[in-house]
Image: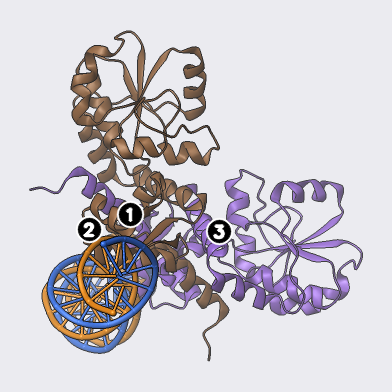
Chain colours: A purple, B brown, C orange, D blue
Amino acid sequence: MPTSPKQALLKEYALVAQALAAPARLMLLEQLAQTEAAVETLARKTGLTVANASQHLQQLRRAGLVTSRRAGKAVIYRLRDARAIALMGLLSAVAEANLAQVTDILDGLSGDAPAPEPITRADLVRRLAQGTVTLLDIRPEDEFAAGHIPGARNATLADLDRLLPALDPEAEIVAYCRGPYCIYAHQAVALLRNRGFNARRMDGGLPEWRADGRAILTGGQS
Amino acid sequence: MPTSPKQALLKEYALVAQALAAPARLMLLEQLAQTEAAVETLARKTGLTVANASQHLQQLRRAGLVTSRRAGKAVIYRLRDARAIALMGLLSAVAEANLAQVTDILDGLSGDAPAPEPITRADLVRRLAQGTVTLLDIRPEDEFAAGHIPGARNATLADLDRLLPALDPEAEIVAYCRGPYCIYAHQAVALLRNRGFNARRMDGGLPEWRADGRAILTGGQS
DNA sequence: TGATTATTCAAGCGACTGCTTGAATCATAG
DNA sequence: CTATGATTCAAGCAGTCGCTTGAATAATCA
């Protein structure tokens, strides 16, 4: 018998979940959430071999999470729609809520003192309008150039110490990075708080900000 | 070196996705979204062997999606929180939006004419208050008894033909069942429309209704 | 206590995954 | 057309997954 429609449906749903079930593919999705990219670029950023990345990307495409198009000799992959971002976010939310392991890892990042609650994106907008907050984008320069929150200043973790003297010690500092799987912002906040600054994370990363339909600024260093 | 925190995090996230990556576990989650239950009950409802169901349930527990408690000689499993339902819903939403296969299967269920858009839960509430709609719960009687939407009438697919004469041919009929993975409501709507009734599905199933915080009626046949 | 019922454990199997390697394909540039 | 660069395909290997089977635990009941 030709397998019931119910079984066929469940198999398709499982296929989507399966696409999210490998760390390598989560890394690729995280990168793709920043901006579309060619296979070779993605392979380099994630540390995978090109052939391996290609295979993972094809699996993501089969699951309907990404699409690809040819551009000259390169093939550009991109997220299919914002739902993929929502799925990634929910996945990490479930993991953080229900897996003791995850909270341990994240707490470990923030050193001795517990990190404060992240600021919501809506609140951040208000604070930015008031000018009562310094916003840091903790991602590599090329990702910052591909799009960032207006008013944000780019800094990698390595840069951060050098940047400290230029920061207003009175203003609150908000850091963000790639999104749910990215720990740069966690680490930046920990470092800043160690130095005595009043720092916290933004809830979500740039992909979530973009998914909200909020303004994005494209182009070089700010 | 003790694997970077980043890798460790991704592995945990992947673990959650992996738990959703097998049709058998999706079936179990669908059942658990109706009501908590013992291993043997779940095994019978899903057609799995008891040992197999037990192993799947343990995997779900490791992923933080369900919890268990002992009750006499039985072990009762239940969803850990509403996030699991959200995750299941999003998974099916992505699959339906991005996988041609899925839409083919679902369209195949509804016969010749395409099915109308489902009614939102908020709209349904309004229509129920006005009394301009007949609500059908297309699930087995025991699940209906464990909780259903107030005002709903229980009917399995097999019952449905017998029930037809009692239905108001003028009123619109709305059907719902277990949730995102359940096709009973699809099938019921197709059957009713074939018979000339004005029928459509409710968006989501009982678990989503419950997750909204809406009223649930518990107890026997209505 | 021993018998019963519900669940879990442990071992084994066939199938599938993720990764590597090396060759094949495809589009552009000379 | 051939050469080059980017990607994909194909084969192979170690490791994991899902399922089955039969035994081992737990909690109740007579």
Chain bearing tag 1 is B
Q: How many numbered markers are drawn?
A: 3
Please tell me which residue lies in front, A35 or B163: B163
Residue at numbered disc 3: A93
Please tell me which residue lies in front, B26 or A110: B26
Question: In the shown orientation, is residue B25 left or right of residue B208?
Answer: left
Residue at numbered disc 1: B28
Instruction: Please provide percent x and percent y for residue A20.
Output: 40, 62
Sequence-wise, the earlier of marks 1 and 2 is 1
Instruction: Please provide percent x and percent y for residue A209.
Output: 63, 51
Question: Helix, strand or loop at disc 1?
Answer: helix
To the question of a shared chain for discs 1 and 2, the answer is: yes
- Labelled disc at residue B48: 2
Residue appearing at x 24%, y 34% in the figure: B107
Badge 1 vs badge 3, beta-carbon distance below 8 Å:
no
Badge 1 vs badge 2, beta-carbon distance below 8 Å:
yes
Amino acid, disc 3? Ala
Amino acid, disc 2? Leu
